[in-house]
Image (cartoon, grey):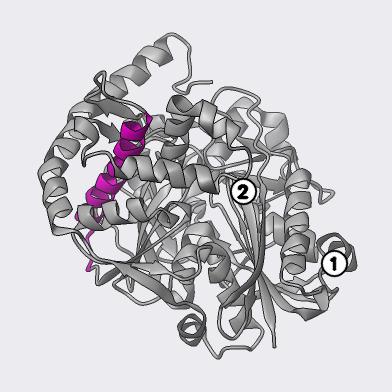
Amino acid sequence: MSFIVGIDKGTTATKAVVFNASTGKVVGSANRATRALHPHSGWHEEDMEVTFDRVAECIRAAISDAGLTGEDISGVGVSGHMGGLWALDADGRPAGHAIAWPDARAGEIVAGWTRDGRMDEIYEISGNAPIPGVPLALLAWMKANNPDRFASLHQIAFAKDYINYRLTGRFVTDESDISFFPCDIRKRAYSSRLLDIVGIPEVAEKLTEVLPTGSLVGEVTPEAAELAGLKSGTPVVTGAGDAVSAALGAGAVLPGQAVTVIGTSFMNNLTTDRPVMEPPGVGFLFLMPDGAWQKLMANTGGGSLCLDWALRAFDNDRLTAAGEDRADYFATIEAEASAVAPLANGVFSHPYFNTSGMSAPRFIPEARASIFGFDTSTGSAQMVRSVMEGVALSMVDCYAALDGTVDEIRLTGGGARSRLWARICAAAMNRPLGLLEAEETGALGVAVLAAVATGQHPDLAAGTQAMVRLADTVEPDPDLAAIYADAYPLFRDLGRDLEPLWRERADILSKQGQRQENP
C-alpha cells in the first residue's frame, strides 16, 4: 500500500494530509497556524524560515497521526496561496520576509493602473485584473519605494515553491502559479510586455523556471528529510497554486465542472477549454493541467474571513473562552444562527472585509464591507447568519456574471463544514451542491498530482476518478430559495450604489495621507 503527503500551505494555517494513493482516503493529518507579520497597517508578511519550520512540523505530525513513517511515503505535493512575493537572494537565502497576497501596500499603484488605462492592456494579455497582492504590483511598489531590497532579489517565485525549494534544493515554479503573477494567459508563459507596462523590465532576469503543473521537481534532501520526518529521496512534484489545487481536489477537471471554496477568500471556479476573458477586467484566469484553464470569480474580500470578523466583533468572549479546540463552540454558533429567521431580521452584509476589496463580479479594490439594516435586535447570531447569507449572495453575483456553461458545482473549504452555510449557498443558487468526502481539497489536489507523477495512476482523469469522491449532495430548499431570490436584487443594487462611495472614501483617506486599511 502506498501513501502520498499533500500539503496545503494556507494564509492562516498549513495542513498536511496523508492519503492512500489508490483511493484518496485520508489516513492522517495535522495543521499548524501560519504566523503572519503586520509591520505596518495593511502589510501582510511571513518569515520564510519560520514558515518552513511549521510546514516541516506539520508533515511530521501528519505522518505520525497516520501511524506511518517516512519510509511509507511515496510522494509529496504542495499547494500554496497564490500571489505575494517569495524571493531568494544571490546566496539562496530568503531576500527578506515573504509578502503574502492579502498585502495592500501596492493599492495605490494598482488604482493608478486603472486610472491611466494600463489595466486594460494588462487584462488583455493576462486575463487577470491584478489585486495589490500580486507580484507584478508588489515588485512595482518595491522598485519605487524600497530600491535596495528590490535590487537584492535574485530569484522570484511563490509560496509553495519556497517549500519545494527547502524540500529539494530546487527553486522552480509551475504554470498554475505564474497565472497570478500574472502571465500571458494564452501563451501560458511569463510576459515581458507586462513587465514593460509597469516599468520593471529587469525582473525578467529574476524569474524562475516554469514546469508543467504536476511535474517532478526533485527529491527530498537528507537535511529536509530529518526536519520533516520523510525519507531522503522521496519524490516531490511541483504541486499547484491553491485555487487550482482545490479544483483538482474537487474533481473539477472537465469543462463545465465548477467548485466553490469557502476559505479565507470565497472562490467560484469554473474549468474551461478556452481562456474565458469575459466579463472584461473582472475575475482571475488560471492555467490548469493538460492545457485547460480555470475562470475564477472570487470574492477576495472574504469567505470564512468574514465569519471570523463577525465572531471577534460580536462574540469575542465566548470565542476566546473556547480556546484552540472550538468544535463545540462552532456547533453552538451554528445552532444559534440556524434559529434566526432567513435574512437575519433584515441585516444585509456585503462581504468585503479583506483589504483586497472586490475582484468579482466587478473589479473594485476600494470596496469594503458594509452592514445594512442594523437595529436593536441585531446580536451575534443575526450577524453570523447575515455574513453567511452575504457570502452566499456574492456567489450568485459571481456565477451570474460568468460567460460559460456551469454543469455542476461542488462545495468545499473550511466553511463548507457548516451544514447551515451549505444549505444557504444551495438555496441562494437554487441548485444542488455536491459536498466532497475529503475536506482538504487543496491537499488532495496536489496528492493526486503526486500520485500520477509517481506512476500510481496513468493520468489526471484516472487519478481524480479514483481519489476524489462526493460524500453528499445538498438540495436547495424551495422556500428558502424563494426568500433569497427576493432578497438578491437588494443585495446587488446596494453594492452598485455603494461603488462610487467606496471610491470617495478611498480618496478622502488618500488626501489625509492615510491608507485605506484599518490597523
Left or right of 267? Residue 206 is right
Residue at image point 64% right, 53% down? 14
Q: Which residue is mark 1?
A: 225
In the figure, 412 relative to 407: above or below? above
User: In the rendered structure, which disc, 1 or 2, sits on the residue that comes first in sequence?
Assistant: 2
Residue at image point 77% right, 44% down? 50
Residue type at mark 2 is Ala
Dot 2: element? strand
Packing grade of label 2 (10 A; few <14, some 14-19, many >=20) is some
Name the image quarter holding residue 302. Answer: top left
In the figure, 437 relative to 40: above or below? below
Name the image quarter holding residue 28. Answer: bottom right
How many marks the image carries: the answer is: 2
| Location of residue 346 in the rendering, given as x and y in whole percent from the top left corner | 19, 31
Question: Principal SS element in the magenta part?
Answer: helix
In the figure, 426 relative to 437: above or below? above
Which of these two is toward me, 450 or 238? 450
How far apart marks 1 and 2 lie (CA) works out to 22 Å
Q: Which residues are magenta?
A: 380-405
Say whether residue 127 is visible.
no
| Location of residue 442 in the rendering, given as x and y in whole percent from the top left corner | 53, 63
Say whether residue 437 is visible.
yes
Residue 312 is inside the magenta segment = no
Residue at image point 18% right, 31% down? 494
Left or right of 389? Residue 10 is right
| Location of residue 301 in the rendering, given as x and y in whole percent from the top left corner | 40, 39
Q: Which residue is mark 2?
A: 13
Residue at image point 28% right, 70% down? 408
Left or right of 211? Residue 189 is left
Task: Name the mark on residue 3.
Answer: none
